[in-house]
Amino acid sequence: MGLKESLEEPVSTFMTKGFVKVEADDSIFRAAEAMVRLGATEAIVMKEGSPVGIITERDILYKVVAAGLSPQQVKAKEVMSTPLQTVDESVKAQEAISKMSKLGLRRLVVTKGGDPVGMITQKAVVAGPRGEHIVLPELASPKSFACPYCDATMKTREELSKHIDQVHLGPGLLEGDRSKW
């Protein structure tokens, strides 16, 4: 399955079902331990049985470690991003990618009936539904380059890259800036 076809699949095809949950009053140290144990890069923060936010490894690094704070003292609710951004499991992957791009996020919580059932990441969509590694294609003919997302045609590789960056992914990725990924 190519990238174009993958984008038409529901997010449930790409989501990871195992995700870390931590309580709002848990320490960042405890959250990080749980994330390492499951090999996760994020944890959903819960309060009274409901999801209220998310903590990522970058949050821990930037908001706690780099700030010189104690992971044993800082609570999850102090570091989490809120409100929690979600997408229903039936939504197409391209809609989820678009939402992530507009919000400047790398992941969304996947819900079913309002309850979290998984996590979807930009990386998972690009890697494919079964972990295949789909390379972001440059579909080139001798005279034009076709966008794999919307079939728009560009005259040069640079025009295509700029189009994908600005319209579909946000600036920088295809020009080598992987800081958002």
Image (cartoon, rainbow, N blue to C red):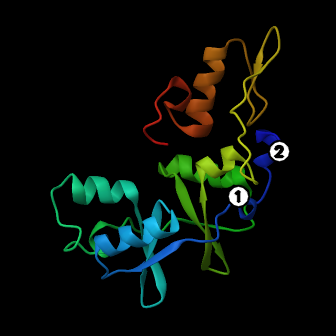
Residue 3 shows up from this direction: yes
Residue closest to the eye, 113 or 75 = 75
* Kind of residue indicated by mark 1: Phe
Residue 69, x across and y down, in percent: 16, 62
Upstream in the sequence, badge 1 or badge 2?
A: 2
| Residue 81 falls left or right of residue 98 | left
- Classify mark 2: helix, strand or loop: helix
Residue at (62% x, 30% y) in the render: 164
- Determine whether label 1 and label 2 are within 8 Å by CB: no
Residue 59 figure quarter? bottom left
Residue 149, label in figure: none
Residue 49, x across and y down, in percent: 48, 89
Quadrant of the snapshot with the N terminus: top right
| Residue 128 falls left or right of residue 52 | right
Q: Nearer the viewer, mark 1 or mark 2?
A: 1
- Classify mark 1: helix, strand or loop: loop
Residue closest to the eye, 96 or 25 = 25
Residue 14, label in figure: 1
Residue 91, x across and y down, in percent: 72, 62
Residue 30 figure quarter? bottom left
Residue at (30% x, 82% y) in the render: 25
Q: Residue furthest top?
A: 142
Residue closest to the eye, 18 or 143 = 18
Residue 83 shows up from this direction: no
Cα separation between marks 1 and 2:
13 Å
Q: Residue furthest front?
A: 37
* Kind of residue indicated by mark 2: Glu
Q: Which residue is mark 2?
A: 5
Q: Residue furthest left?
A: 68
Position of 82 relative to 51 (above/below)? above
Position of 104 relative to 51 (above/below)? above
Position of 85 relative to 146 (above/below)? below
